[in-house]
Amino acid sequence: MRALFFLAMMALFTGCDSNDSDSESNNNENRDYKQDMRDLVIGISQKAKSFSPGFVVIPQNGIELVTATGDASGSPATEYLDAIDGNGQEDFLYGYDNDDETTPASVTSYLKSFLDISKNAGNAILAIDYCFTPSKVSHSYDANNAFGYLPFAAPERSLNVIPASAPVNVNADNITALSQAKNFLYLINPENFNSKTAFINAVTSTNYDAVIMDLFLNDEAFTAAEISQLRNKANGGKRLVICYMSIGEAEDYRYYWQASWNSNKHDWIAAENPDWPGNYKVKYWNADWQGIIYRNNDSYLNKIILAGFDGAYLDIIDAFEYFER
């Protein structure tokens, strides 16, 4: 994959074909919001994989998109399932109502009915539970392993710490595909690290098979050389390094946010997320937003690819729920 890096540079900047769904319509009530999100994820995947076929694409939540109807009894959404390599699911066993509390069995059963459709299509399932009581952490790992999922028990919902315990299923294998991973670290908030060097040292002292992290630390992007360092497991094996990117909300602390938007927002920027100040729902089918995310030559996705990441972890996939309401 590394050898193809410079040979494929021209392909990265050729852009993507226009999509009729990008043209704005004032009659949003007639939109299929689920399909709009599928189309966005598929577009991101097609561009990334045209540059690097092994590039990993993992949408988080919004698991209903794996069927054509959004119902567990619906037929698999084949084009969408073929475009992704896994699904991330938060609060699967713990954290749905409150952190360190058991998720209602009905919710777990509902989510599992969709997750297994993706799993049966050959995709990895990354199950994130928010719990810290030792017995609950152990149950999270044991139960998710039994389901054939990749588990991560996060002690903090802000995802700013590396758990004190060692990862499960530790191995010294070189991980070159998500299907080979036996565990992962979800560490997208680097607020506890005062430098990129400190972050790199902390991660490379672990044996996780994959790490999901942010492109930036203190507004400074990680370089391809630094991402190469982060691939090193402490036991000598290699891991995947995957970059977090929110595609269903705009974040006012990101490089793309313009100061003028604070007082005069585009009409494709919707309500602020009350749980995460500074995050705004977006009309994710809008051409301007898609340009920022993946279509433009200086898009977020281009920055991730040029930094040498092995994949992208796409968040706020469930933004369709906001617009459906």
Image: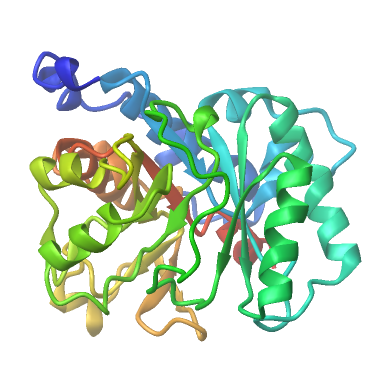
278 displayed left or right of 10: right
Identify the image quadrant of residue 229.
top left
Seen at 23% across and 43% down, the residue is 304
Residue 279 location (% of width, % of height): 39, 75
137 displayed left or right of 59: right
Residue 204 higher or lower than 278, as above or below: above
Q: Quadrant of the N terminus?
A: top left
Q: Is residue 70 visible?
A: no
- Front one among 123 and 210: 210
Identify the image quadrant of residue 36.
top right
Residue 141 location (% of width, % of height): 68, 57
Q: Quadrant of the C terminus?
A: bottom right
Seen at 12% across and 40% down, the residue is 224
Q: How was this image coloured?
A: rainbow
Seen at 61% across and 63% down, the residue is 323
Identify the image quadrant of residue 17.
top left
Residue 181 higher or lower than 98, as above or below: above
- Front one among 169 and 55: 169
Residue that protrudes farthest toward the front in the picture: 235
Residue 21 location (% of width, % of height): 47, 37
